[in-house]
Image: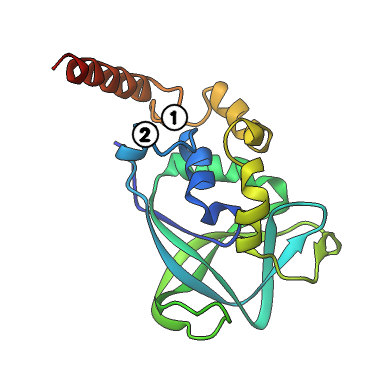
C-alpha cells in the first residue's frame, strides 16, 4: 500500500497544480481520473530565512538560505514515496532535497505583499539550490508572471520537454508507482470504467 505521509514545500513552478500533477501522476489534465484518486492537500505557507531567486535563462526559481528573507509558497501533504522519487528526477542535480520548517499561513498577504499571518510550524522537504550561485539572478522570481506568460509552455503538448527525464525514468519502470502513473494499469482501468459509464449514460 502506498505511503501518503510525505510533505513538501514548493515555491516555484510546482505551486501550479497542473505542473505538480504532471510530475507526480503523468497528467496535467484535471479530467484525468488519476486526479480523483490522489490525496494531495495544499496550504499557503512561508519559509523564513531563505531567499528566492530567478535562475538565469530559465522559467523556474531557486531558493538558498538568507537571514531575514522569506519565501511564500505552498505546503503540500499526502505525497507518496513514489511522488518524491519523481520530484527528485524532475528537480535534477542542481537541487538537493532538504528538511525545513515552514509556517502555515492563517492569513495571506494582499497584492502589496503585506498581511501574512504565520500559524502552525510544520516540517517539510524542499529543494534547495546546490549548484553554482553565479547561475542565479538577484531578482525575485514572480509566480503570477509565470502563470501569465510561461504556464502554457509547461502544460499540454508544448510542455512535454520539461518532463522528459521523468517520463523516461517512468518508461524504464523505475518509479514504483504500482500502476498509478498516467500510463499505468490502474489509470487504464479507471479510464475504461469512465468510458463504460459514459456509454451507459448515453443509452439512457
Mark 1 neighbour class, 10 Å CA radius: few under 14, some 14 to 19, many 20 or more: many
> Horizontal placement of 83 versus 71: left or right?
left
Q: Is residue 39 above or below residue 67?
A: above
At mark 1, the secondary structure is: loop
In the rendered image, residue 202, in percent from the top left (x then y), is placed at 21, 17
Q: Is residue 15 above or below residue 182?
A: below
Q: Please state, as top left, top right, bottom left or bottom right, where the C terminus lies in the image.
A: top left
**Which residue is identified by label 1?**
181
Q: Residue at x 71, y 70 (%)?
A: 140
Name the foreground residue: 110 vs 45: 110
Q: Is residue 158 above or below residue 145?
A: above
CB atoms at circles 2 and 1 under 8 Å apart?
Answer: yes
Task: Report which quarter residue 112 is drawn in.
Answer: bottom right
Q: Residue at x 41, y 39 (%)?
A: 30
Separation of disc 2 and disc 1 at Cα?
8 Å
Mark 2 neighbour class, 10 Å CA radius: few under 14, some 14 to 19, many 20 or more: many
Name the foreground residue: 188 vs 180: 188
At mark 2, the secondary structure is: helix
Residue situated furthest right in the rendering: 134
**Which residue is identified by label 2?**
34
Task: Report which quarter residue 154 is drawn in.
Answer: top right
> Horizontal placement of 8 versus 129: left or right?
left
Mark 2 vs mark 1: give the one in front.
2
> Horizontal placement of 118 versus 63: left or right?
left
In the rendered image, residue 131, in percent from the top left (x then y), is placed at 77, 56
- Which numbered disc, 2 or 1, marks the residue that appears first in the sequence? 2
Q: Residue at x 69, y 61 (%)?
A: 62
Residue situated furthest left in the rendering: 204
* Label placed on residue 107: none
Q: Residue at x 69, y 65 (%)?
A: 141
Colour logic: rainbow
In the rendered image, residue 184, in percent from the top left (x then y), is placed at 42, 22
Amino acid at each position: 500500500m502506498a505511503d501518503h505521509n510525505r510533505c513538501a514545500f514548493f515555491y516555484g513552478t510546482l505551486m501550479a497544480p497542473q505542473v505538480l500533477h504532471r510530475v507526480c501522476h503523468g497528467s496535467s489534465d484535471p479530467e484525468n481520473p488519476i486526479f480523483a484518486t490522489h490525496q494531495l492537500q495544499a496550504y499557503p505557507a512561508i519559509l523564513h530565512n531563505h531567499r528566492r531567486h530567478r535562475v538565469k535563462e530559465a522559467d523556474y526559481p531557486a531558493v538558498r538560505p538568507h537571514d531575514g528573507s522569506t519565501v511564500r509558497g505552498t505546503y503540500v501533504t499526502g505525497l507518496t514515496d513514489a511522488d518524491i522519487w519523481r520530484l527528485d528526477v524532475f528537480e535534477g542535480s542542481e537541487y538537493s532535497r532538504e528538511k525545513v520548517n515552514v509556517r502555515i499561513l492563517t492569513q495571506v498577504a494582499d497584492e502589496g505583499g503585506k498581511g501574512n499571518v504565520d500559524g502552525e510550524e510544520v516540517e517539510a522537504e524542499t529543494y534547495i539550490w546546490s549548484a553554482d550561485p553565479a547561475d542565479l539572478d538577484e531578482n525575485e522570481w514572480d509566480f503570477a508572471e509565470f502563470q501569465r506568460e510561461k504556464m502554457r509552455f509547461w502544460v499540454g503538448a508544448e510542455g512535454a520537454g520539461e518532463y522528459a527525464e521523468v517520463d523516461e525514468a517512468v518508461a524504464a519502470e523505475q518509479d514504483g508507482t504500482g500502476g498509478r502513473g498516467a500510463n499505468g494499469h490502474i489509470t487504464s482501468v479507471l479510464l475504461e470504467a469512465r468510458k463504460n459509464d459514459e456509454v451507459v449514460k448515453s443509452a439512457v
